[in-house]
Image: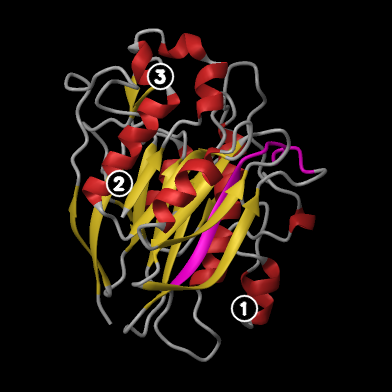
Amino acid sequence: MLSYNVLAQSLLEGHHYLYRDSPLQALEWDYRWAGLRREVADLAPDIVCLQEVQFREPDHFTSSYLPFFTSRGYRYVSKQRTGDKKDGCVIFFRGDIFDLDCVSEMEYRIPRVQVLDRDNVGLVCRLVPRGQADALVIATTHLLYNPKREDIRLAQTALLLAEVDRLATRPVGEEGGYLPTVLTGDFNSEPASLVYQLLATGGVKYQGVCTSRGRRPMPAKLLPDALGLSDSCQWQVKLDQRGQGEKFQVGSGGLHHGLALKSVYPMGPGVSTHQDYWTLVDYIFASRHPALRLAGRLRLPNPAQAERLPSLASPSDHLPLVADFLLTP
């Protein structure tokens, strides 16, 4: 599996000052696309989760990504960011290995919900491996960047987890808990963040936390009751359908989930991007499921080993995350 923020060319050109230390050639789309193709061809992943794929002005998804991936036997699901944003997320998967069962194309902007007023998106899909009984749930997202608004990222994460819970839950009457699950993406959240704590430990208390100087502490209820989202990061309607309506809870001042996720890339010393300093904000989280076992991962450099991005060798301002999993019946 490969997870990669590939840097939309429109964002690069709109924030050129961020890349003034990179060689000019390394910033040209044709040169970067050749590098992206080379990395995918060398790694030959079965599943590819991409963030910042450009869909408009120009449409690199149609002109570049689709011909390349489809010629290699990949199928895909995609979701462009809302509003006037030009990029979005894509999950490519090998069509000779997986069949697509269902997909949720998520929009985090929800009218009249103040903490959900940004154009970020997510993708959750359920893939059925050919020749195996159990399906596999894959999710990818690109959360809000604004360092001052961890409350927004936390709310976006709660929505993502609720959709993962919906697609990873077996039908009523079937035993075995959740399906094997992998979450990937650019979470714009460091390992000390509330978002990482929620994902990696299963729970977080946010009430009273100040996201930045001058902002009010977060309240006991981050999301309105009308959204129908439990503090367990589950939809109320799904809990009712499962006969678990009594588990619906809001206003606890925290969020939790039961997906039992573990980061493929633990805290330090590896870094994935440079945001004023070298840091880790991209992750692959895999569920602790007996049918899903981590077999290996591509090492990330420490800050002393990293070079400014994009470079002649690395075509994006993020580094790719790669993990090998064994999926057994």
The stretch in magenta equals 113-127
* Numbered disc in front, either 3 or 1: 3
Secondary element type, mark 3: helix
Residue occupying the point 57% across, 34% down: 144
Q: Position of residue 95 (x, y in %)?
A: 40, 69
Residue 140 visible to the viewer: no
Q: Is residue 117 magenta?
A: yes
Residues tagged 3 and 1 counted as in contact (Cβ below 8 A): no
Q: Which residue is mark 2?
A: 40
Disc 2 residue type (three-letter): Val
Instruction: Please give the residue where the numbered disc 1 appears in the rendered image.
Output: 244
Q: Label 2: state its secondary structure.
A: helix
Residue found at the far bottom of this picture: 173
Distance (Cα) linking label 1 and label 2: 43 Å
Reading the chain from its start, which is encountered first: label 3 or label 2?
Answer: 3
Nearest the viewer among 173 and 245 is 173
In which image quadrant can residue 143 be found?
Answer: top right
Q: CA distance from mark 3 to mark 1?
A: 52 Å
Instruction: Note whether residue 181 is visible.
Output: yes
Which residue is located at x 41 percent, y 13 percent? 19
The residue pinned by badge 3 equals: 27
